[in-house]
Image (cartoon, rainbow, N blue to C red):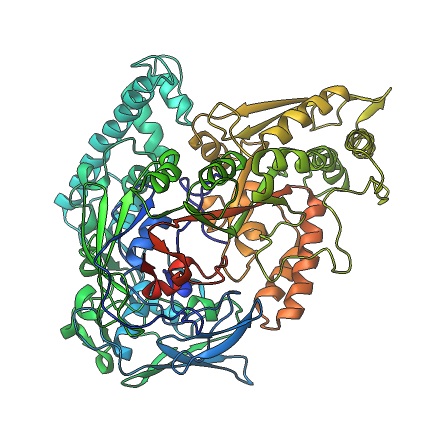
Amino acid sequence: MNNLTRRNFIEGLGAAGMLGILAGCGNGGTTDGGTTDGGSASDTPLVVGYSPFSSKFSPFFAETAYDQDAQGMTQIALIPTDRLGQIVYKGIEGETIEFNGTEYTYTGPADIEVTENADGTVDYDITLRDDIVFSDGEKMTIDDVIFNMYAVLDPTYDGSATLYAMPIKGLDEYRSGMDTMLNLIIAAGRDNTDFSKWTEEQQKAYWDAVDTGSKTVAQEIVDFCGTNGYNDEGDIVASAGNWGYTLNEGATIDDFAAALMEAYGNNLVAMVATETAGSTIDDIFPTNADYSVGIATGESAANISGIVKTGDYTMRVTTTQVDASMIYQLGITIAPMHYYGDKSLFDYDNNSFGFPKGDLSLLRAKTTQPMGAGPYKFVKFENGVINFEANESYFKGAPKIKYINFREVQDVDKLNGVVTGTIDVTDPSWSKDTATAVEQANGGELDGKVITTSLVDNLGYGYIAMNAHNVSVGGEPGSDASKNFRKGFATIFAVYRDVAIDSYYGDGAIVINYPLTSTSWAAPQPTDDGYKVAFSTDVAGNPIYTSDMSSDDKYAAAKQAALGFFEAAGCTVADGKVTAAPEGAKLEYEVMIPADGSGDHPAFMVLTEAKNAFAEIGINLIINDLTNSSDLWTALEANQAEMWCAAWGAAIDPDLTQVYYSDIANGGKEAGGSNYMYQIEDAELDELIFESRHSTDQEYRKQVFFACFDIILDWAVEIPTYQRSNAIIFSTERVNVETVTPDITTFYGWMSELENTQMN
């Protein structure tokens, strides 16, 4: 699973994700079927419509999917994947793999050989091509790869790469004994008098920034809420409430600022990054980057013993144990050391790797100006447009289109932009209404003279959830009574999924029955032994539904089955209604849904239909339609949410640790995962999750995942709801769609072979 942030984890309309898959493992395929004749690149620019950028166009620090795509235009990844998300081990000569009846050849910058040793360690031997140059003509060597690894493994690294979570030999010893000045100053507190590791002026500057910056953010939130009509202008308490913070009547800006800082443990940088309604951390605290530098706090190793250079173009990475995610984590970007670091600081034999350990300021300085060995060169970003120019020295051949522009555009204007000619390619949110509009533009088809449409499953899924502690019996979330109580709710939610998802998405989504994106190789299939529709059996384990039931019959059967679960949980049931709840439970629960206050969410109909059904059996479901999705995040972090609707993003290789492992259940967000939302604590599940990570046998792992899903569904904290499609639309009139990457998949986007695309 991907790490979650306030900005990307809550799904409302189901906006499409990345337009392409150039970043990370996704970049690096070529195809026998997609090449075109040579010739000069077209001077007609390809205009791609994007949601707004955040200007973090860095292979190390990009956060949003759109910034990732922008930097990915300029970069290549060490290890590519194919259309099914499988690793391409022999990238130098290429591997030919069949997909959908066609053989495609995938190439990349390196070969990788994996050896599992008798002592349990694993060696990853990497051989880099010796003929790749960056877009400025500088040659790429294995030193660049090592530089990139040390950058994302640095103790102070705070980007999105998670290679540091892998069991690389010697990594813990290298990362220990160091913390950032920011963290140390916060831990020391305002009254600290030990200035051996930082100056008194630095400490004072930080706390002054906290005092002034938190007030600035608080006031901007109040101004934003008032200006946009969320509450009366100047109403601090109401504004804070709309932002997810509860203040006492009469609270001041100082009180709101204090609440913001308390929520983030006095970390101004983290608070501003998440809560700002205007100012950036650079506006509020211009010297903040100085505080990200590492300070030695104890002993640490001078190098990572598991990263060994074996030649100018070869290296070995050794892990202490098998980890199925490791091969995917090695798909790092190969950014140029001479640009992002300092080539004079690379001395492998003397433990210097292109930058001072604990100081990534050289890398951070290039955040807005990416450069690499990818198919395009970054030119500039101004007036909402990123300009790219073809990299003539791209190792797969110079791109056929000389210029590409990424243009910021609001989602509601994306489709019309293609129709009117201001945009050539874009990703509108896909729904029944969008499909109808495309068909109207084409005269009745999704593919026509005006628009060509590509639909692929999103790498993620939508769900309805419950907190195991907040929806339980007797304060025992893992008891049979608590599980049955939640299954009563889950059974009714589940029966309305079909009608709701069809109403919202039409053919653009399907209902899923297991807590995993259906794009994954590990997702259970209807043909698998033991597969069943989620929450389709009663308390005795018998099927609730029969094949000849009408929809109304199913709804009635679901209510009857729910009553059985509630009674088994200890509820008093009489005359078809729940009349009393057992100790620790109640007959009224709130479900939070970020539907913009207008019901605009795929699961909203599920909730409204379920609310009526629950009312008929004596339970009140309160639907809280949020205008500000941050309210949900705040409630989840505080373990106050009872039920909610959201969506998970996923990685190519599934890992259930972050979301369901017990150690994360009560540790809060700081524990490094998301099970603090569900709060599952199950020893058997923990053991199975461990097994799923420490084997590379895919068939075995699939069986283990299946067993994990059964336990998760038995806890009834998550009702898998839908798997939606992402849409990419092309102007048939302006883009030569015959030259676009063929057989686009979730793991292999239209930009995976961008160098072959041509304009008409």
Q: Percent from the top left, x then y, of residue 736? A: 36, 57
Location of residue 760 with respect to 269 vertically, above or below: below
| Residue at the image point whose x is 29% and y is 14% from the top | 234
Q: Nearer the viewer, residue 475 or 608?
A: 608
Q: Is residue 211 left or right of residue 264?
A: left
Q: Quadrant of residue 509?
A: top right
Q: Percent from the top left, x then y, of residue 425? A: 36, 49
Location of residue 231 with respect to 485 vertically, above or below: above
Q: Percent from the top left, x then y, of residue 304? A: 34, 74
Instruction: Count all numbered tags in the image, as a single digit.
Output: 0
The quarter in which the C terminus is drawn is bottom left
Location of residue 97 with respect to 271 vertically, above or below: below
Q: Percent from the top left, x then y, of residue 523? A: 63, 57
- Is there any visible trace of residue 504 in the rendered image? yes
Q: Quadrant of residue 49?
A: top left
Q: Is residue 395 left or right of residue 10?
A: left
| Residue at the image point whose x is 77% and y is 60% from the top | 529
Q: Nearer the viewer, residue 605 or 272?
A: 605
- Is there any visible trace of residue 674 in the rendered image? no
